Amino acid sequence: MARNGLASRLYNGEAGLNIVGRRKLWFGVAGVLVLIAILSFSIRGFSLGIEFAGGNSFQVPASVGTLDDAEREVNSALAAENTGIEVVTAQKVGGPGGDSYELRTGQLSAEQATAVKAQIAEDLGINADQISSNQVSEAWGSQVTERAVLGLVIFIALVMVYLILRFEWRMAVAAVSSLIMNLILTAGIYSLVGFEVTPSTIIGFLTILGFALYDVVVVFDKVQENTRGITANNNQTYGEAANLAINQSLMRSLNTSVVALLPVGGLLFIGAGLLGAGTLKDLGLVLFVGMAVAFLTSILVATPLLALLKNYDPRIQAHNKRVLTRRGAIARGEAAGKGPASPAQADATDEPLDPDAAALAGAAPKVGARPAGKRPTGARGGRPGGGGNRPGGAKRR
């Protein structure tokens, strides 16, 4: 009984999940999520760190008390100087001189920063030399953003060229579309959660591009293997072969994603959550969300989109019609063929079956299966009977 469980069938590529046949559902869900992400960008926006929005940071020794105590004293000093600015983020960081608290605020003038620093030292009862303050201009963040966008454009261009040479242009379009959707959804989640955008976030976004591409290439490689020479037979439509490839590579993609998410999850939930390493949460969140979304988009978006694009190829259209016509003839008893297969294969058909063909419910065998007919016999088709005309085949006297 255990051998027939879902995990076992996934491992053997026999789950029969109908992914390509339900592509309208996946496209609809993806469209709604993208719309939510775009609305979040427009309405909520992003919580920019001081590297991008500009601001000041103050580091005080952790010996002054808890992080909440330090944040309260810094806010008090800001209010005392009538700056109208409050602490934006506070986190505990380590350093050569020991642990300290880093508190970031909005943009202050040089005079305000000096006065606030002196007030913080007075309120905490420490020497002003024990407090370090830094000012960051938003121009630096703008330069980082421009470089990141340039890197993204170059990466996508190189990916397009590679996929066109390795596979074909339709696979390149489907893969890049999945990649862009992955970035939009990850950025949308980042915007909704409200995590601060830092240089670590940008690094994380560029990192997940490679992982997302790997997931798509794994699936597309299996699709190419299953569909090679598909027009030479009338057993499967392109959508059925692509759906079979998803089922065959699903467990591999799942294992790869889980193995990659475990250390990233430890970085996010243990490092940033339990141990309080705030500098890790920006990188950890974008990696965790990006890798999880990459797995889903490579399965639910990239391959169904590829099947949709291939349906516009006249060769594939003619092939699909031949397959459906043959199934209709088999259903009416006008031609010999195999019995019904799983309903998932029928649902994955690129074009709707006619009423007669629907009765067969998708009789497509797997790619590479041996013909069901008998092996021919005779001098050419099979093993010759008796001695035949082979040398040395004469009967002994």
Image (spheres, helix red, strand yellow):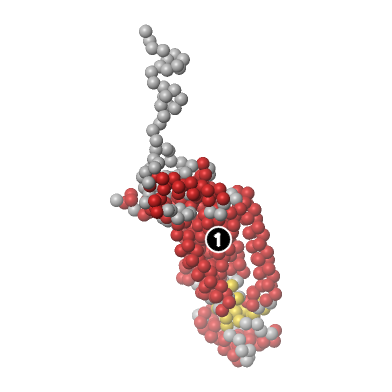
**Residue drawn 44% across the image and 14% down it:** 392
- Quadrant (top left, top right, bottom left, bottom right) of the C terminus: top left
Q: Position of residue 297 (x, y in %)?
A: 51, 61
**Please, is residue 41 above or below residue 8 in the view?**
below
Q: Position of residue 327 (x, y in %)?
A: 42, 47
**Please, is residue 353 above or below residue 379 in the view?**
below
Residue 61 picture quarter: bottom right
Q: Is residue 390 left or right of residue 183?
A: left
Q: Is residue 89 visible to the viewer in this orientation of the structure?
A: no
Q: Is residue 275 left or right of residue 16?
A: right
Q: Is residue 329 visible to the viewer in this orientation of the structure?
A: yes
| Residue placed most toward the observer, 361 or 7 | 361
Under tag 1, what secondary structure?
helix
**Residue drawn 57% across the image and 75% down it:** 41
| Residue placed most toward the observer, 61 or 224 | 224
Which residue position holds label 1? 178
